[in-house]
């Protein structure tokens, strides 16, 4: 199955796409009890996934890798920092209608630059163009790291379209550079899946997650049950990561 088909199917499964399909099915069967029940479940799911309380519970449940403890790096010998791509703004008018990195990728680059200053390690951005024809994310990342953060970029991996390809193509690059161990930078919600595929690819990766959503235990207030678009997006991210791990397992079992 090609990558375009996979991404299209994901959009039909992960909220809000999956909920829209369920809602339409419920409308088609609305004269039956099952149709009415399906509509009720769809609306209830849409509401709950859109609340800050539920979305934070979902995203926190996958942020299982703790922040890096730099004091313990003395027991390791990382030789570079690998930072994974995270998306783009296409045709940003404020940048002369050229593509630039989105807020997710910028957050990862900022943390990679901070780690680089603290450790003195060079950075290797990883990420291609995805379904777009524009400049690879790794090339945009190199420019930002060097010109805006003043950090050394050792090399780039600019062909990958998925996390699994990030790992496989980065492994080939690291072998050429004779690098055995790296710090791996991505979002906390993405790190468990990314770390798994990097280890499967044979890379010794020390996780350095950023952008945590989890908070200390708290009693939800009324505003935590108020639906909002950003919370639905957070819930969708958590579901995407869960399904992503399942998909990789299926690929291993069935050789898709």
Image (cartoon, helix red, strand yellow):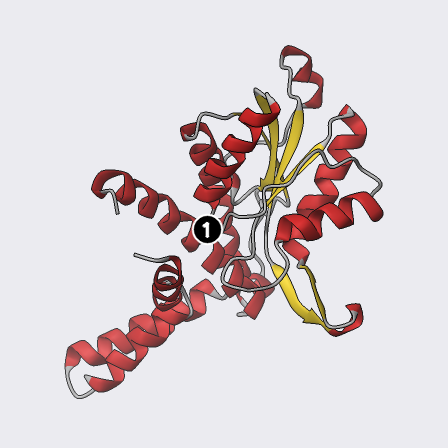
Which picture quadrant has residue 19? Answer: bottom left
Q: Outermost residue toward the top?
A: 75
From the image, tell me which residue sits under label 1. 58
The location of residue 135, given as percent across then percent down, is 64, 58
The residue that appears at 26% across and 47% down in the rendered structure is 256
Which picture quadrant has residue 240? Answer: bottom left
Q: Nearer the viewer, residue 151 or 17?
A: 151
* Residue 61 in view here: no
Which picture quadrant has residue 222? Answer: bottom right
- Left or right: 81, with 173 as reference point: right
Q: Outermost residue toward the left?
A: 32
Q: Nearer the viewer, residue 255 or 133?
A: 133
The residue that appears at 46% across and 60% down in the rendered structure is 236
Give the position of the N terminus as an image quadrant: bottom left
The residue that appears at 54% across and 64% down in the rendered structure is 132
Q: Outermost residue toward the bottom?
A: 31
């Amino acid at each position: 199955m090609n990558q375009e088909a996979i991404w299209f199917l994901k959009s039909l499964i992960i909220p809000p796409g999956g909920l829209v399909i369920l809602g339409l099915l419920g409308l088609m069967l609305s004269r039956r009890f099952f149709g009415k029940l399906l509509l009720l479940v769809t609306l209830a799911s849409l509401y709950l996934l859109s609340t800050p309380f539920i979305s934070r519970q979902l995203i926190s449940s996958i942020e299982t890798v703790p922040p890096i403890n730099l004091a313990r790096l003395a027991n390791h010998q990382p030789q570079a920092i690998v930072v994974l791509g995270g998306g783009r703004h296409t045709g940003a008018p404020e940048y002369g209608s050229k593509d630039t990195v989105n807020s997710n990728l910028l957050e990862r680059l900022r943390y990679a630059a901070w780690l680089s200053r603290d450790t003195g390690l060079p950075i290797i951005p990883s990420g291609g163009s995805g379904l777009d024809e524009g400049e690879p994310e790794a090339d945009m990342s190199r420019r930002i790291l060097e010109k805006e953060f003043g950090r050394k970029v050792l090399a780039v991996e600019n062909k990958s379209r998925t996390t699994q390809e990030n790992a496989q193509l980065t492994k080939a690059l690291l072998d050429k550079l004779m690098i055995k161990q790296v710090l791996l930078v991505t979002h906390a919600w993405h790190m468990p899946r990314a770390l798994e595929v990097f280890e499967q690819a044979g890379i010794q990766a020390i996780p350095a997650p950023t952008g945590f959503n989890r908070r200390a235990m708290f009693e939800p207030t009324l505003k935590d049950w108020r639906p909002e678009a950003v919370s639905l997006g957070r819930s969708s991210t958590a579901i995407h990561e869960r399904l992503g791990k399942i998909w990789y397992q299926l690929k291993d079992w069935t050789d898709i």
